[in-house]
Image (tube, coloured by chain):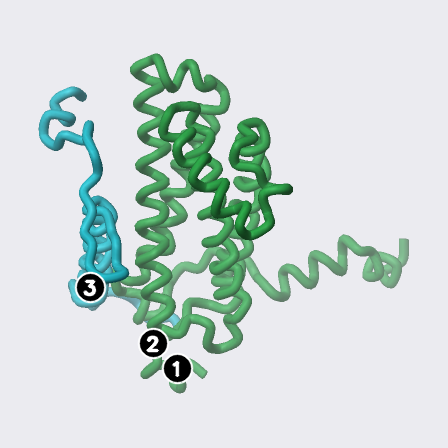
């Protein structure tokens, strides 16, 4: 697994973004951005086999 | 024993009440409403799947102990599986939360479904914190010394001491997992009893 460590060097100080009262680490910002992207994808990407499903209300 | 006596037994009454509220075809349905065919409905089950991996890897870590997860290759691997399944658990749960919030998932008498979800979320955060302070490394020392100030500021430090490793480990591997699993079970049962919330435009059709 050492190859994984060579892609991103995590052995150092964290990086932070600071804007007025907002202070967020780059790592947290990446995770939040991925969650927003996943949420938007879940809303707008077509669901496989939607037309074939039986309705049961 | 007469029929009246049998009807009065607590086991009979409980069974009738349980099967009345949640018949087997409602507990494990064959089909779902058409509006469930959307990715946004996947994240509740994704959270549940991640929770199963969290519990499974947690059980292995509890059996083998800290020396194993710090020093052996397989121990590192299971420790990493435990961490990353927790990351996926929270990731999926947040997307599930956003989806349900914008659907107004408390509609149609589903308040208890919503509230059991809220309490499960809070219990999961505390489980996560106690996990971080139970790692037995410099990271857990740093987190516990930072967290103690916050918790002491609330006045809760006398009862919940993040510097007390034994207390944190017991909360993490006994009390909080029981709470999280029971609450998740109740949440899923509430979803089965009340059904999945329909979109706003379908609400009148369903009612």
Do circles 3 and 1 both sit on a common chain? no
Q: Mark 3 or mark 1, which is nearer to you?
A: 3
Residue A17 relative to residue B204: left or right: left
Label 2: which residue? B199
| Front residue (pair B13, B114) | B114
Name the residue at the bottom extreme.
Answer: B204
Q: CA distance from mark 3 to mark 1?
A: 23 Å
Q: Mark 3 or mark 2, which is nearer to you?
A: 3
Residue at (48% x, 37% y) in the render: B130
Which SS class for mark 2? loop
Q: Residues within 10 Å of mark 1 (few under 14, many from 20)?
A: few
Q: Residues within 10 Å of mark 3 (few under 14, many from 20)?
A: some
Do circles 1 and 2 both sit on a common chain? yes
Residue at (59% x, 47% y) in the render: B156
Residue A33: image x %, image y %?
A: 19, 55
Residue B178: image x %, image y %?
A: 57, 41
Label 1: which residue? B203
Residue B119: image x %, image y %?
A: 52, 57
Q: Are marks 1 and 2 in contact (CB under 8 Å)?
A: yes
- Using the rendered image of the protein, determine whether residue A49 is visible from the camera's viewpoint: no
Tell which subunit mark 3 falls on. A
Do circles 3 and 2 both sit on a common chain? no
Which colour denotes chain A? cyan
- Using the rendered image of the protein, determine whether residue B111 is visible from the camera's viewpoint: yes
Q: Which mark is residue A40?
A: 3
Q: From what the image shows, is residue B202 above or below residue B144? A: below
Q: CA distance from mark 1 to mark 2?
A: 6 Å
User: Which chain is displayed in green in the rendered image?
Assistant: B
Residue at (57% x, 37% y) in the render: B161
| Quadrant location, the C terminus of chain B | bottom left
| Front residue (pair B170, A15) | A15
Q: CA distance from mark 3 to mark 2?
A: 17 Å
């Amino acid at each position: 697994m050492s190859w994984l460590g060579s892609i991103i060097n995590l052995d150092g100080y964290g990086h932070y973004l600071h804007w007025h009262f907002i202070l967020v680490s780059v790592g947290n910002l990446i995770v939040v951005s991925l969650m927003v992207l996943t949420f938007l994808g879940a809303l707008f990407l077509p669901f496989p086999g939607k037309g074939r499903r039986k309705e049961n209300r | 024993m007469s029929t009246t006596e049998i009807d009065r037994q607590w086991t009979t009454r409980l069974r009738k009440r349980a099967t009345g509220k949640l018949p087997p075809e409602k507990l494990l349905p064959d089909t779902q409403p058409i509006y469930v065919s959307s990715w946004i409905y996947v994240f509740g089950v994704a959270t549940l799947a991640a929770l199963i991996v969290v519990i499974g890897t947690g059980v292995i870590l509890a059996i083998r102990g800290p020396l194993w997860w710090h020093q052996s290759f397989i121990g590192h691997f299971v420790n990493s599986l435990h961490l990353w399944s927790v990351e996926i658990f929270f990731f999926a749960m947040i997307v599930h939360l956003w989806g349900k919030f914008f659907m107004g998932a408390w509609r149609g008498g589903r308040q208890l479904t919503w509230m059991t979800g809220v309490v499960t979320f809070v219990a999961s955060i505390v489980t996560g914190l106690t996990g971080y302070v139970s790692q037995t490394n410099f990271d857990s020392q740093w987190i516990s010394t930072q967290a103690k100030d916050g918790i002491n500021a609330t006045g809760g430090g006398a009862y919940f001491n993040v510097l007390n490793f034994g207390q944190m480990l017991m909360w993490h591997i006994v009390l909080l997992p029981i709470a999280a699993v029971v609450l998740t079970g109740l949440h899923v049962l509430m979803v089965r009893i009340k059904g999945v919330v329909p979109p706003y435009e379908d609400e009148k059709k369903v009612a």
